[in-house]
Image (cartoon, helix red, strand yellow):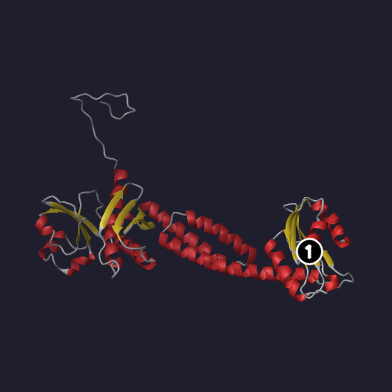
Amino acid sequence: GTLNPSSTTALSVGDVGTCHVDYTRRTSIASNHTMTHVLNHGLRKYCISSKNPQIDQKGSYNDDSKLRFDFSYNGPIPPQSLSDVEQYCNTSISQKLAVECKVEKLEDAQQLSTVRAVFGETYPDPVRVVSIANTSISDMLQAPESKEWMEYSVEFCGGTHLSNTSDAQALVIVSEEGIAKGIRRITGITRQAAVDATNRGETLTLLVADAKELTGAALEAEVKRLGAEVTVAIISTVTKTKLKAVLQSYSKTILAWKKEQAAQRVKSILATATAPTTTSNVVCRYDFGTDGKTAKTVMTQYQKQQEKPLLMISADETANRFLVFCVTPKGCAKEQKVNCKAWAAAATEGTNGKGGGKADTAQFTVEGLEKIDGVLEKARAF
């Protein structure tokens, strides 16, 4: 055989090799594994409810970059509960709790009030017990049924672990999601990755808070930028949820500003459209782009307030196109009434303009700003 499929070094019976443990990688795995135990205990401590009276482990995976924990739970974990779990894990780290691994008789270990075991799993006898507590396993076994031990994480486990929670440095829950009916998954990171994620989250929190001082277009641009940054950022999902909520509140402010801007724009457009004129109808230009919604609002308000037919042109210089729309007011005298569809069609004749309408309103779009003067001329001559 060979060491691996791509190796050219052959192995034979009797060959001697030396195995080395990658302790740098193993320490990261141990950190993620130990904090998975703390996380499991935190879920029991903060997420048990009438809707979820029991939380059972359904799967676990730990490597040097992350921890992943699957568990039974109906519905997403409430944001506050998830925050409490994350805070509990970090408090356990700051408390510098000892991580003790001890082999005990299975019958004795199973009597511990706080022990967590995987449902359906068959454990050896004796069994390896891993506790994360400020009380030794031996002391716990002196009074195994004491409710005092419920404050500590105790599990049957044969994996690699830290010797003290402080070596994990920090824990950040980066996601919480459903993977099947009644099954949730939490993904987390520890050590330097968690420290970096925490710092990144704090920086984004400050930036989002500072955005509150902005207004109008500046606020809109910053919310768009921060929204994209927050979405892809590797930070606590608890922090991410809070930041998205704040940005959403800013979006409401932006929407109110846009509505006010639109109202002012319509008011200004109507001021141009209602300027005194001696002609029987109004033909004018006011550039606000080719926004059909704005044009419709102008037509609706003009139709209610004025008496003369209106044809207006609005150009979009960036897109090199312009909008032609016209309206006949409801209070227009019979002899002054104009068929808007015919009027707009006549004004845009020969321009390849596209649009349509009815007798009282019409709207066309024309490519090429150089055609505007010709359209205005035909509109006035109609």
**Residue 63 rendering spot, x and y as whole percentages:** 32, 47
| Residue type pointed to by label 1 | Cys
Give the labeled residue for mark 1: 340
How many marks overall?
Answer: 1
Q: Is residue 189 left or right of residue 372?
A: left
Q: Does the rendering let one see residue 380?
A: yes
Mark 1 is surrounded, within 10 Å at the Cα level, by few (under 14), some (14 to 19) or many (20 or more) other residues, namely many
Work out whether 5 lies above or below 264. above
In terms of depth relative to the viewer, which is nearer, 340 or 34?
340
Q: Is residue 211 left or right of residue 76?
A: right
**Residue 86 rendering spot, x and y as whole percentages:** 35, 62
Q: Quadrant of residue 51?
A: bottom left
For the N terminus, give its image quadrant. top left
For the C terminus, give its image quadrant. bottom right
Residue shown at 76% from the left, 74% from the top: 330
Q: Quadrant of residue 240?
A: bottom left
Work out whether 329 lies above or below 314. below
Work out whether 355 lies above or below 270. above
**Residue 354 rendering spot, x and y as whole percentages:** 74, 53
Residue shown at 69% from the left, 71% from the top: 263
Q: Secondary structure at mark 1?
A: helix
**Residue 325 rendering spot, x and y as whole percentages:** 76, 62
In terms of depth relative to the viewer, which is nearer, 63 or 308?
308
Q: Quadrant of residue 14?
A: top left
Q: Is residue 73 left or right of residue 104?
A: right
In terms of depth relative to the viewer, which is nearer, 299 or 215?
299
Q: Does the rendering let one see residue 265?
A: no
